[in-house]
Amino acid sequence: MLAGCATTDNDAVIVPTGPAIAAAPSADDLAYPLTPAGARAFVESVEAESLELSDIAGRAYWVNSTYITEDTDLLAAYFGTIATEKGVEYAAKAARYAQVDGLDYDTARKLDILRGGLTLAAPTTDGAAKELNDISTALNSAYGKGEATLNGEQIPGNDAEEMMGTNRNPEELAQLWKSWHENVGRPMKDDYARMVAIANAGAQELGFDDTGAMWRSGYDMSPEEFSAMYDRLWAEVEPLYNDLHCYVRGELSDHYGEDVQPDEGYIRADLLGNMWAQSWGNVYEIVAPEGAGDLGYNLTDLLVDNDVDAVGIAKISERFYTSLGLDPLPDSFWEKSQVVRPEGRDVVCHASAWNLDNVDDLRIKMCTKVNADDFVTMHHELGHNYYQRAYNEQPYLYLNGANDGFHEAIGDFVALSVTPEYLVQIGLLDADKVPSEDKDIGLLLDRAMDKVAFLPFGLLVDKWRWGVFDGSITPATYNSAWVGLKQQYQGVTPPVPRNDAIDFDPGAKYHIPGNTPYARYFLAHILQFQFYKAACDMSGWEGPLHRCSFYGNEEVGERLNAMLAMGASRPWPDALEVFTGTREMSAEPMKEYFAPLQAWLKQQNAGSDCGWPTA
C-alpha cells in the first residue's frame, strides 16, 4: 500500500523477472482454470478486490500516520495484515498462471507484477503475516514518536533535523546526533532482526533467494543485471563525489579546526548539516568561497520576507505544474492534506504523497517549515501527486511509476528548474538580484551539496539491507556494517564511538523502520538530470545546462504527461524513451550539469590529500 517517499497508491506494482515460486498452490486451489482466459479472469478478480481494499486500508494508514495512537496502530496493523496475506496469496497463484502458454501481454505483465509486488512477504505459516505487520507498524510508529536530546531538553524529530542544519556548535551537534541515533535506533534492533527473518521466509516461499533479491527483481531485469547497472551508475559519478568530498572536508577543517575536523580522512558526520550526512546544503555557507560562493540571495530569507507560509509554498509549487499546462490540484487536496505539523498529537513528519481513492483524492503529509529545503521538498512531493493523477485511468496493477526511481525523479527534475530566473518569474526575487555568470560556481556548489553529496548515501542504504537480507550482515554486525559502508562510500564517520552490541544506527533513518526500498532515490538522482536535460532541449535552451528553467513551457508538460500517463503499463525503458528519446539510464547529463564545478573543485583541491581509508 505504501510506496515512494513514501508515496501512496498500491505497492504491488513493480515488475519482477525473478524465479518461479517454489511452493505454488495446486490447480485445485485456483478459482479459475489454467488457461489464458482463466489467467485473465484471475487478474481481473485481483484488481477488483485490491482496488476495494486499497481504499479503506489507505485511509487507515493515513489516520495512523497523521494521528499516532495505540488504536490507529492497531488499525494500520490490521489492514496491513490483510494486505500482506492477500499479497502472498496473489503472488503464489500468479506464479501458477504465469506458466500458462499463450498469455496476452497485459495478463503476463500483471502476473509478473503480482509475483514480486510485496515489499515484505510473509510466509504462509499461521500468524506470520500478523506478526510481520505488528512489527513493521510498531517500528514505523516508534520512529514517528522519536525524540533527540539537547542539554537535557527533549527535541521532536523534525525539530532536531532542523537544528542539525543550523547549529554550529560541534559539542551540541554531537549530542543531537548521538541522542537521536540511540533513542530511536537502539530499541528497534531485535524487532528488526525478527522482521527480517519473517520477510525472508516469505520471499523464499515465493521462489526468491531473499527479500533483497525480490526487491532487485522489480526493474524489468534480473537482480544481477540490476546490481550491475547500479554499480555502473555509481562508477560514473564517483569521481565527482570524491572531488566534492575533498573540498568540503578542507573547508570544514578550516572552520572548526583540526581538532574537530582533520583535513584528511573521513568527515565527521554531524558537521554536514544533516542528521544522516545524506545532503550537505545546510553547511553551504561554511564552505562557500568568498566571492564565487555569494549567490546574492537566500531562498529562505526570500520566503520569509515575502510572507510566504507553508500553504503558500504548496501553492507556488502547484503553480509550476499548472504553468506546464497540467490541471490544478483538486479542492480536496487543500482540505485534507497535512501541510504543517498539527499540535497536540504524534504524527509521522516524513514527507509523503498520497492518492487514497486511486483517482483524485490527492494529499500530501508534511510538517512544512518555511525554508529553502521544504520549498524544494514541496515541489518534489507534488511531482508524486501529479504522477498519481496522470496514470489514474490505468488498471489497478499499473497504478505506479515506470519504476520507483521514476516516481522520485519527477518532482526533483522540476525542482532543478528552481533557478534565480524562476524565482524572478514567480515574484520572489527582484530581477536586478539575479546572480551574474561569475556566481555560477556558487550556484553549482550549492546544488551539489545536496544532489552530488546524496549519491553514495542513496547507494549504500539498500546495499546494507541487501546484505542483511542475504545474511552476509548479521544482527551482531548490523551497526559495524552500516558504519563501514558509510565510511567506504561516503567517507564519513560517527562523531562518537559506537557500541556494536546494542547500537542500531540504521534505525535512525526513516526508510529502515519504514521499510521503504531506497535504491529508488539513487536512481532518481540520476534520472532527474536526464529528464531535466530532455526538458531543456525541448524548450530550446542553448545556454549552460544549470541555468535552464522550463517553467511555463507547455510542450514539456505535454510530453511529460504522456510519459506519466503510462504508469507501470510498459517497461521503464519505453517510458524513458517517450520523454528523453533514450532507453538507458545514464549519469552523463548529471556530469554535464556539474562539469564547470568539477573543474573548479580540482583546482581548489590541488595539493590536498584527497581520499580516505578504505577497508
Image (cartoon, helix red, strand yellow):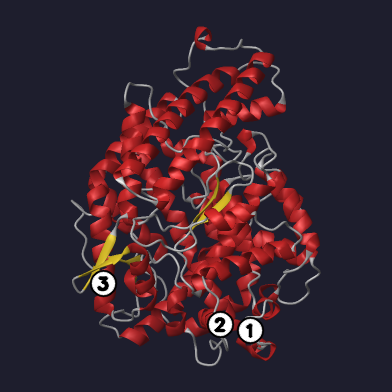
Return the disc, 2 or 3, that comes first in the chain's sequence: 3
Taking 507 as reference, is 106 left or right?
A: right
Secondary-structure class at tag 2: helix
Mark 3: amino acid: Ala
Task: Give the distance between the C-alpha atoms of the residues marked 3 and 1, in whole angstroms.
Answer: 36 Å
Mark 2: amino acid: Leu
* Residue at the disc numbered 1: 429
Mark 1: amino acid: Leu
Whether residue 274 is situated above or below residue 210 in the rendered picture: below
Picture quarter containing residue 264?
bottom left
Of all residues shown, which one is farthest toward the top?
28
Q: Which mark is residue 174?
A: 3
Q: Residue at x 43, y 46 (%)?
A: 63
Rendering coords of residue 49 (x, y %): 56, 26
Q: Are marks 2 and 1 in contact (CB under 8 Å)?
A: yes
Q: Residues within 10 Å of mark 1 (few under 14, many from 20)?
A: many
Q: How many marks?
A: 3
